Every structure is written in C-alpha cells, then in structure tokens.
Image (tube, rainbow, N blue to C red):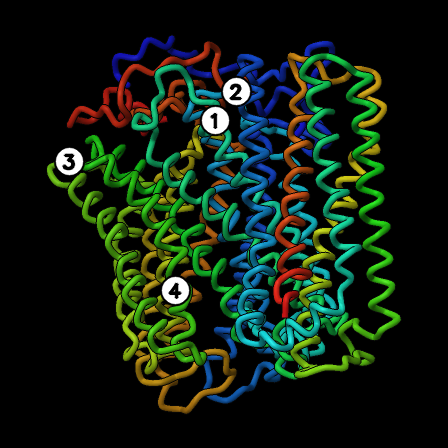
Amino acid sequence: MTSSPNPVPAEFPRTHYLNAAYGLKSWLWTRDHKRIALLYLVSVSVFFALGGLMAVLIRMELATPEGDFFQPDVYNRLFTMHGVLMIFFFLIPGIPAVLGNFLIPLMIGAKDLAFPRINLLSWYLYTIGGAFTLWALLHGGVDTGWTFYTPLSTNYVNTAVLTVGVGIFIAGFSSILTGLNFIVTIHRMRAPGLTWFRLPLFVWGHYATSIIQILGTPVVAIAILMVAAERVLHIGFFDPKLGGDPVLFQHLFWFYSHPAVYIMILPAMGVISELVAAFSRKPIFGYKFVAFASIGIAVLGFLVWGHHMFVAGQSIYAGVVFSVLSMLVAVPSAVKVFNWTATLYKGSISWDTPMLYALGFIGLFTIGGLTGVMLATLGIDAHVHDTYFIIAHFHYIMVGGAIMGYLGGLHYWWPKITGRMYPVFWSKLSALVIFIGFNVTFFPQFILGYLGMPRRYHSYPPEFQVLNVMSSAGATILGIGYLMPLVYFVWSMRYGPRATANPWGATGLEWQTTSPPPVENFAYPPVVTAPPYTYEAQPAAGKGAARVV
Amino acid sequence: MSSESHGPSDLAHHFDSYEQQKESATLGMWTFLVTEILFFGGLFAAYSLYRSLYPEAFRAASHSLDIRLGAFNTAVLIGSSLTMALAVRGGQTGKPKTTFAMLLGTLLLGSTFLAVKAVEYADKFTHHHVPGPSFHFEGPDAPHAQLFFSLYFGMTGLHALHMVIGAAILAFMLRPALRGAWTPRNHNFLEGFGLYWHFVDLVWIFLFPLLYLIGRHH
C-alpha cells in the first residue's frame, strides 16, 4: 500500500500492548487478541515440546530392530500420545490461534476480534482440555492410536480413553469458538475500503479454515460422546455385540479428521502466500485463484474422508467415488503451488529467513501432496495402507508443510509481535538444519513403507535397520533445528535489536502500525484504498536498514 | 453471544456502531447454530443408517413409545417458542414487564417438557427398555431394537441437555429482564438466546416424527 492515506507511525513506540499493563492478572484476564495470541504461543509450544519428546522416544526405540527400550504397550502409548498432542494440541490450534489471532484484526484494520471474551474463553478451554490430556498421560496414557477406533476404544482397552476423550472434546469447543470468532470478525470488522478481494491471502486461508472448524469439529465431538456413552453406559452405537457397526465410527471420525488436515495446512498456505509475495517483491500471481483455491480445498476436503477406509470394508463403489474426489483436492492445491512459483518468476527474491522457510514449505508440501495423489488411487493404497509410506506422506504435509509455514510465519511477524529482531545467521541456519533434518527423517520412511514396514510396531525385521537408523539420525538433526528458534526467539525478546514498524518493507495493514502495536492496534482507524501486495519489483528502501539493526 | 459492555455504554469498545455490534452478535449466533446442527447431525446420521438397515426392529421399538406424551411435549415446546418470540418482541419494543412475563412462561413450558420427558424415561427403566445388561424387549430382532433405544436416549438426551442449559440461562435472565437490561438499541443477548431456544425447539420437531411417528400406521 504505497499510496496509503494512513499516517506513518513513530518508529519505536513508548507504550504498546506488551507494556500497557503488568502482572499475571493482566495476562490471564486479558481480552486483547494480541495477548491471547501470546498465551496460545506459550501453551502451544509446551504441547509441541511434549509431542516432540514422544517422537524422540519413538525414534529411539526404532533405531534397532528389536523392541529393546520399551514394552510394546508402552510403545503403543507413546505413538498414541504423540499423535494426540501434536494433532489436537499443536497443529490444529497452532497457526490460527497464535498467528491468526494476532494478525487477523491487524490485517483487516480492526481493534480486536468480534468477541474478545469468547476468544479468551477458547484459550481457557484449550488449556483445560490440554490439562485433562496431560493428566491422562500421567495416569497411564492411551494406547488406541490417535484414531480411537471402535470397538478397541470402547471395549478392549483399559487405558485412559475417557480422560483423553474429555480433553479432546473440550479442546474441540476451543477450536469451534476460534473459527466462529474469525468468521464473524472477517465478515463484520473490516476497515473502510477493505473489500473481500483486497483481503490478504492469509485472511482468506483462515476464513476457509474457520469454515472447516465450525462444520467438522462438532461431528468428531458427537463421535467422542457416542464412544463415551458406549464405554461407560453400554449404550451401543458401534459395538456389533450391541447391534452397532464399528465402521460408522470411522465415518464419523474421518468426517472431521480428514478435513482437520486442511485446518492444519490452509493457514500455513496463507502464511506462504504472504511470504512469497513479500520476498519476491511482486503481487501474488493470480490472487483470486489462490483465494478461491482455499475455499475449494475446504469444500472438497469434506467429500474425501472415505479414502481412509479403502480397506475397512467400505463398498468398492464408494471407494471409487472417494478416490476420484480425493484426487480432485490436488487441483486447488496445485493451483497454489503453481501460483507461488509464478510469483517467484522474475521476482526480486531476497533470501531472508522467512523466505527460506517458505521455499522449504513449497518443496516439501509438493512431495507430500503428490504422494497423497498416489495414496488416493485404490490399488496403491491397498498395498501401502498402514505402512510407513502413510507416515511419511502425512508428515510431509503436517511437519514439512504446516510446521514450516508456522515457523516461517513466526520469523516473518516476530518483529511485529515483540518489536525485536532475531539473529540473522542463526535463524537462517535453523531453516537449513530443519529442512535437512526433516528430509533425512522422513524420506527413508517412504522407502520403508513401500517395502512393507507397517506402522505402529515397536520392532521390525533386521533388513529395515539401515533406513530406520537414517530416520532416527535425521530426527536428531530435526530436534536440534527446532531447539534453535526456541533459544534465539527467547533471547531476542530481551537482547534483540529493536525492529522498525516495517522491517521487511512489506505491504499489509499490520505493517502500518508500530512494532509492537498499541493496545487498540492503530493510532488512527485505517482506510484501505488499494489491493494487497502492491509491490514494485525492486528492494524496498527501508529494508537494508532493517538488516543492519 | 453476549455483547461486551463497559461501564455505562452498551457499545463495546472495539465496535464502531450499534449496527456493527448487532450484526456481529447475530452472525455469531447463527454460526454457532450451524455448529449445533452438525453436532446433532452425527446422531441423525447414525439413526438414518440403522433405521434403513433394521426397519422391522425400529418399527417395533418405536411402538413402545407413548405417542400422547410425545405429542403433548411437541405442543408444549411450540408454545414455548411463541412465548420466547414474544419475549424478544418485548425487548425490541422496550417493554421489560412483557419480556419478564414471557421469559417466565418460556421457562415454565420448558420445565414442563423436561418433567414429561422424565416420566417417559422412568417408564423405559421400569420396562427394561434402557440399553445395557438388563435390557429386555419382546419383539422381533431384539439386539437392533436395543440400538433404537440407544439412539432414542442419545438423541432425546442430547436434546434434553440443551433444554436444561437453556432453562438455566433463562433463569438467570429473569432479573435483568425485569430491570430492563434489554433495550430497543441493544437486545442482542436476548435475541441470540431466542435463536438458540427456537433451534432446540426445531430439533424436537425432527425428533418427534423420527422416533415416535414413522411406521406408526403399520
């Protein structure tokens, strides 16, 4: 927004949302979306660390073919809790509740989300749900896999299924309320002149995500309630002994849990659209196509759940339909990848840290997406179902995609969030280490799965050891890569150089206020007069200065 | 979806106008109701599946429900939707006494519904129609008749839970209603709750025929 009518803010604000009030109560009782975003950042990081710890233990066990570190039932608990923590308590809230919460009101020129108290409530619900899950973890954990398939979960296991179920149920409400808040905010709180096609693509991505959150989450919530009723009250829904059908649970579960994958990836795609445009210094190629691709993925995502059940006794005709629909999701996904690539073409590309993460995302997401098309074909899926091929595929989307996007976004907006810059060298190194570590960890798993190594076993035939050792070694590198941002981000909050209002020379309303922003976000109500990404194809003037500080 | 209120002003700090505040509250409530539809949707899906698989068992089990109590409760709930709508009208036109009286009427009708429901549930316990180890049913295909009762308790139970939550909120709304908390300018909470009440009513409008009426003529 080069010809912006909005006044330029002071470089270093004296008071802002971080120092406007002090004390624990000013944080735990805040209605400010920016502070709530930081509350989420802390909680989400804790769950990421715990889930990561479980991953480390899993890879430790799998370094040797024999089951030597853990008993099989302990191993079952490890991979179950890894999945539960990472999916429900890190990946799903991750980008929306941290970056989305902080940025959506700033990007649309609003003072806050439409329902600030509900925003705070959703953080508390998330935290209470997480506490239930951690409590279950301390009381033996769960060993059903994160999928809770019946009748295993309702009849045959003695682990803390209910406690974790309650935890996920409560956290689900948090997710629904976040989605509801975003939808109303995006509809009703936009600044004057900010039409739908002037919205940043980050906002479009979150809008699509919110649709999935409000439509999908209640279905998994009722499925959990039905499992609880069957387990506790013997009110049968799924158990064949009580007249029910276990496949119905899989339908209800995947009706949410497949679209949930898009809850994880769509916000990351929104981040990447911002980064690619800002660091190519070009308007995004085919803005409307990228925007509608988000909606397309959200809609199509609801029609593909059956591809998790190709070998679960589903009708072959249903299988064919789900197979074709699943391949269709590749179309809007490919539209995004091609449009990012076209944005890079003849762009004035700079290799700042967020851009390194964005480029990593594009490569890894492409591999994850293409293997997804392979898995959508019935024949290949029957062969590799429940093998490490699946594990590798979805980690390329969730870790290579969603987490790269999350970290890229954190590095891009960190100066806005904290008002501080982080060390350039270490942050670039972290992007490189994570990229290498990720590929060394997960690429061998494609081969392992294709050769037939099943998932969810703590031992395996000796001929798989070389690839498993590679994977475990890669996990070590990946772990170090994730620790690096933790260290320098925390360091930067106190010792990092002060960031200017717009250190990347980027467009977007969030860069037109101070870093960090004032409590009410803008000194003057902003007015929007231009479409987003009005970059000239040359480095911005203020940008070099930002690198020096 | 209550609106924020700070001090004397009933316009929350982050809204520019009452209109924006009202539109946000309304859209938020509708979005929440969409979520609720999907929440009940899981049970409706299970019902559709099992009814089409085991029509005989479902028909036989459905006959054991008391259609008179079901019809009475339907009338009670529709009546409560009328009083709820009149309560909202009282808020819109600035008549606190009307709002109070109508909310009280809604609360009484809702409680009547729950009391009748309790009678029906008690009847199921005495006839061993509650799913579980002591379940007993005279009729064709008893295991799948048990499935009908699972769905009966699941669906009406979830509906009753919504009624209980609604009644509790109603009870807390009586004093503010009498104080005139809802004005023609800002009655967003009252209107939002009205939408919720109508939604819960509407769920019953679907439950009644599905559970009590279908297959009755055989």
Chain for mark 3? A
The x and y percentages for residue B173 are 80, 28
For mark 3, what is the residue?
Answer: A347
For mark 2, what is the residue?
Answer: A111
Left or right: A163, with A48 as reference point: right
Chain for mark 4? A
**Type of the residue with mark 3:** Gly
Evaluate if marks 1 and 2 touch, with contact meaning CB atoms under 8 Å apart. yes
Cα distance in 3D space between marks 2 and 4? 37 Å
Give the mark nearest the N terminus, 3 or 2: 2
Closer mark to the observer between disc 3 and disc 2: 2
Cα distance in 3D space between marks 3 and 1? 29 Å
**Residue A490 in view (yes/no):** no
Category of crowding for the residue at label 2, using alpha-carbon neighbours closer than 10 angstroms: few (below 14), some (14–19), many (at least 20): many
**Type of the residue with mark 1:** Pro
Element assignment for label 1: helix
